[in-house]
Image (cartoon, rainbow, N blue to C red):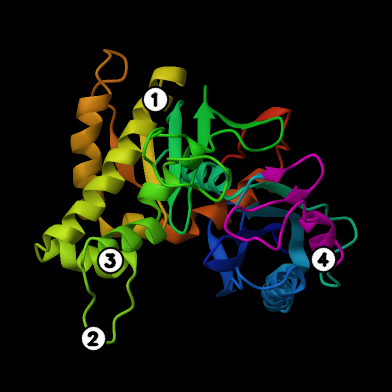
Amino acid sequence: MNALVYGALDIGGTKIAGGIVDNDGHLVARSQCATPARGTAEEMTAAVASVLDDLTARPEWSSLSRLGIGSAGPVDTSAGTVSPVNIPAWRGFPLVDRVRAHPGVPGGVEPVLVGDAVAMAAGEHWTGAARGVDNVLCMVVSTGVGGGLILDGALHTGPSGNAGHIGHLTVDHATGPACPCGARGCVERFASGTAIAAYAVESGWVPPAGVAPTAAAVAVAARAGDPRAVAAYDRAGRALAAAIAATAALVELDLVVVGGGVAQAGETLFGPLRHHLADYAVLGFTRGLPVVAAEHTTDAGLIGAAAVAGPARPARGTHRLPPAHS
């Protein structure tokens, strides 16, 4: 008899990924497509279905026991709906129902929905950089900025599944840019990949010929010493540091783990983040808070979605994760 496996979906503003994860937390199969974030609801649904088509064709899928979904948020885990800030066509969209209806999903498998950054926290706590740590903030810094919390050794999801939504903490009430969420001065408007690239361009930075103006391209320029690119990453690091310090003061943390595409810039992002955090986190119980890179890089959300869907199902607001067997 084949060992049971967990299916996982990770839906963000740039990519839709799917995976099959074994009971040790290893990703044994993976599929991905671009997110048609400006498309219709049905175009989005078709993209999710294409990833599921790939997964269900894998021989490992026959041993599927649970299926987890990590989605950009806000989400509503009780209703099974999603309303991602960066995907306008999905507002109150019944994602769980649509995934459940896919012909390859077995009738006895009930999809479990969480926010994508909550899934990332679950993945890093299960087998990644936060393993064995009781109080952790995990952040995804990518097309958007999200977060998930491990408190007292358990994943803290909150009643609706949105606890840790750090990207929409306001860090500049007075002059900060308007956010699609409806507020002003949110962390996401300073530190997302989109915001970093936009600020660099507005400051006069021009990417090399044939290179798209992305956060990755800005990071290359920053490492080469371009002051406008350096300023864009410093601005992002300052916003992240302010939000991290506020979170640490509220719940007390042992560790911060940062992943997502923008985190691949390495010290270009982590350097200013840690520098500004030393200025913001000045209370004794927040001072010296370690900030590290995610171990699973872009796959933490898949591994975490599998963890959340695993044998230990969520209680209201918290979830004890399954052990990873070595």
In the rendered structure, are the residues bearing label 4 and label 3 in contact, judged by CB atoms less than 8 Å apart? no
Helix, strand or loop: magenta stretch: loop
Q: Nearer the viewer, residue 255 or 34?
A: 34
State which quarter of the image contains the N terminus. Answer: bottom right
Element under label 2?
loop
Q: How dense is the environment of label 3, judged by Cα within 10 Å: few (below 14), some, or many (20 and up)?
A: some
N-terminal of the two: label 4 or label 3? 4
Which label belongs to residue 201?
3
> Is residue 93 visible in the rendered structure shown here?
yes
Q: In front: mark 1 or mark 3?
A: 3
Which label belongs to residue 209?
2
N-terminal of the two: label 1 or label 3? 3
Q: Position of residue 265 (x, y in %)?
A: 27, 59
> Is residue 25 visible in the rendered structure shown here?
no
Residue bearing mark 1: 246
Residue bearing mark 4: 105
